[in-house]
Image (cartoon, rainbow, N blue to C red):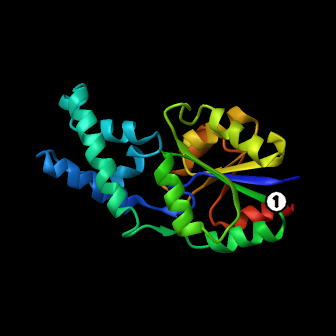
Amino acid sequence: MNVQAVVFDLDGTLLDSLADIANAGNAVLAAHGFPVHPVDDYRVFVGDGVRRLVHRLVPPANQQNQELLNTVLREYVELYGRTWNVKSRLYDGIPELLAALVQRQIRLAVLSNKPHEATCRCVEYFLGQFPFTAVLGQQAERPPKPDPTGVREIQAQLGVAADTCCYLGDTGVDMQTARNAGMFAVGVTWGFRDIQELQDAGAQAIIHHPRELLALIDA
């Protein structure tokens, strides 16, 4: 493979952030008197942006109440903004993978459906020692993944052809994003979703540990 750049999803790929997301979500739900969810349920709640997350969190009977949804969204963003790094951590092997990619002069980028400000904050805090060329989170002017607008914007910043980029992610949305942009879609099994979802969404390779990406690139 002639890989010149790797674009990473953030949550569930680089960063194990599930507990902090769940704790913030459940705290807001409890404050409204709504049932809370097991942490594992958040594996399927996240991945499509914070508005979809909030919609999935509230009880079905309340999911059409836009005023309530806006309130819960605002409260969640505020609380998560104060508690985003309590339990979150990089997955094992990620720092070593990034160091090896830098050594190979492969460019790095992040594209997430997490809000842009939160995405940048997480990357700076957990990954600030690595030279990411581009970091994009969700912004109002850009449609979320799997729309390829964001990843194409990143590709332009990287200055490389799509077919020389790997896109690494843990969800079907990530695989669809990669395929929509003409990038090589690599699914990871250490994240939030299962291997079947990755396969069904068109993963071209599936890896079980970060170091396995190097074997693909070096092949």
Vertical order, 71 against 101 (above or below): above
Q: Nearer the viewer, residue 212 or 115?
A: 115
Residue furthest toward the top? Answer: 64
Left or right of residue 210: residue 101: right
At mark 1, the secondary structure is: helix
Report which quarter residue 207 is drawn in: bottom right
Which residue carries the number 1 mark?
217
Q: Nearer the viewer, residue 110 or 37?
A: 110
Residue 57 seen anywhere in this rendered image of the structure: no
Quarter holding the C terminus?
A: bottom right
Q: What is the crowding at mark 1: few (fewer than 14 residues within 10 Å), some, or many (at least 20)?
A: some
Left or right of residue 49: residue 26: left
Q: Nearer the viewer, residue 171 or 82?
A: 82
Residue at the (75%, 45%) spot, across then down = 157
**Where in the figure is residue 80, as x and y percent of width and height?**
34, 56
Left or right of residue 148: residue 21: left
- Amino acid type at mark 1: Ile
Residue at the (71%, 37%) spot, across then down = 152
**Where in the figure is residue 120, as x and y percent of width and height?**
54, 55
**Where in the figure is residue 160, as x and y percent of width and height?**
83, 45
Vertical order, 164 against 191 (above or below): above
Report which quarter residue 65 is drawn in: top left
Residue at the (73%, 62%) spot, across then down = 213
